[in-house]
Amino acid sequence: MFRNVLHYAKRIVIFIMKVVLAVIPKDQNLILFSAWFGKKYADSSMYMYEYLLKSEFKVFWYTLDKTILEDLKKQGKPVVYGKSLMGLWKQLRAKMLVSSVQFADFNKYLLTRCIYFDLDHGFPIKQSGFEINDSTKKTESFFKLLCLFINYYMTASSLFVERIIERCWKLSEMQIVKCNKPRTDVFFDEKLRIGNNSIVDDIKAGKRAIVYMPTQRSCGKVPINIRKIFNLKKIDDFCKENNAVFIIKKHFYHKDEKEDISEYSNIFDITGEMIDTQTLLFQADALISDYSACYIDYLLLNRPIILYAYDLQEYLVSERDLYLPFDKNECGFKAYTFDDVLAQLQFLARNNWNDGMEKGRNTIRKLYFSDNLSFGRAREEIKNIIGELLLKKYKADWGNEK
């Protein structure tokens, strides 16, 4: 009973705040950007922020991390601290807010009479938290409440992606912006990669890089134990024999799980390091992943992928279901044990790092990336879309794909 009272009281307070704060005039040219709960300077929102720094728009990066705050200040980039009076004021005045993790990137209780543009942090390959929440109806109603008095938009890179978003988030077609993710521009523009990941350049030193990037388990509550998942001695020996290095980069939720593997000369754990994930993908000659959306980005590079599903059944039961059944995903070699992984790595080494699975990768790529997209120009296109959204003139469709 008490919980129900709190539940409805919270919603009443939010509704009243939305009404009261609506009287604050908006700066029609002011746009705030943020990412990953305000704790990272990364992802598509970062690329759009930097692209618009010299535009006609007034842009600020919104952060809850004081290290990021000071770093951006030193670089002379406009930034505000989310817990300061100025940060709160900027959010209230901004006509548009651009995020990577939906409402979690800003103060969700101060949203009213604005445009909320979620560029999202991944492609939909598995159920979202919105779908697997134990109290889905309450979650859905709370989402609708937060959307009250704002214009909410998400992005889709294909008709397949759009259909998932419509079904999952109950958004209308007009709320879904047809575009690629700005972060994919990194694959096509060398200037965006220069100086990003010197630590990885030093590790590679002319060698092949095998990068392991798994998705999170239970929002970081279930550790990813590398020593149990891989036989590190055999991986190290393989790298020595084939002029390669093995690089581990766990999910943001596991950023504090960096492991001591100093006994191995060709294995490196860069979890928690300040690096650019997209540049890391470009630096990878082969990617080992599982149910992480990072392999969707990687499809644009058409390089070998190993999907290592050591806990597939457990994951499907205790974590999330997959939109694309694992056994039907032909974008890369499927491995269920470490021996499967090692066998495929040895196959790659024998065949000049060509896995012969280009056809399967192309099939999955077309599922997630419309042929109507302009690859390498996402930031330019989204700048124009932002202008249209601010002027309420945005219209788009998938053309003949429908």
Image (cartoon, rainbow, N blue to C red):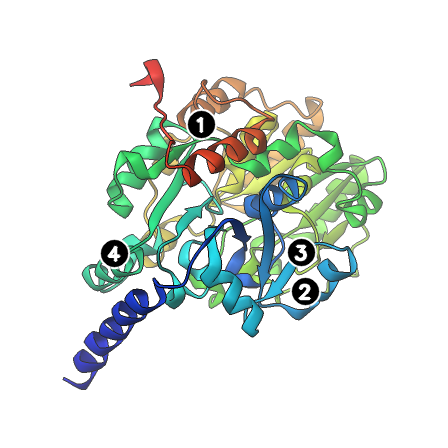
**Separation (CA) of disc 1 from disc 4:** 37 Å
Which is nearer the N-term, disc 1 or disc 4? 4
Decide if residue 51 is on the left or right side of residue 150. Answer: right
Give me the C-alpha separation between circle 3 and circle 1: 44 Å
> Which residue is denoted by mark 4 in the rendering?
144
Residue 326 in the image, given as x and y percentages of width and height: 38, 37
Q: Position of residue 106 (x, y in %)?
A: 47, 62
In 3D space, how far apart are the residues under numbered discs 4 and 2 (Cα atoms)?
31 Å
Give the crowd class for mark 4: few <14, some 14-19, many >=20 residues within 10 Å. few
Dot 2 surroundings within 10 Å: few (below 14), some, or many (20 or more)?
Answer: many
Q: Which residue is outermost to the left?
A: 1
* Disc marking residue 78: 3
- Can residue 125 be seen here? The reply is no
Residue 69 is tagged as 2
The amino acid at mark 2 is Leu
Question: Which label's residue is closer to the chain start, 2 or 1?
Answer: 2
Q: Amino acid at mark 4?
A: Lys
Residue at 18 percent of width and 86 percent of height: 2
- Of labels 3 and 2, earlier in sequence is 2
Q: Label 1: how many residues lie within 10 Å, few (<14), some (14-19) or many (20+)?
A: some
Q: Is residue 389 left or right of residue 194?
A: left
Quadrant location of the N terminus in the rendered image: bottom left
Residue at image mark 1: 330
Do we see residue 303 in this rendering?
A: yes
Q: Helix or strand or loop: what does disc 3 sit on?
A: loop
Kindly report which numbered mark, 1 or 4, lies closer to the viewer in this rendering.
4
Q: CA distance from mark 2 to mark 1?
A: 43 Å
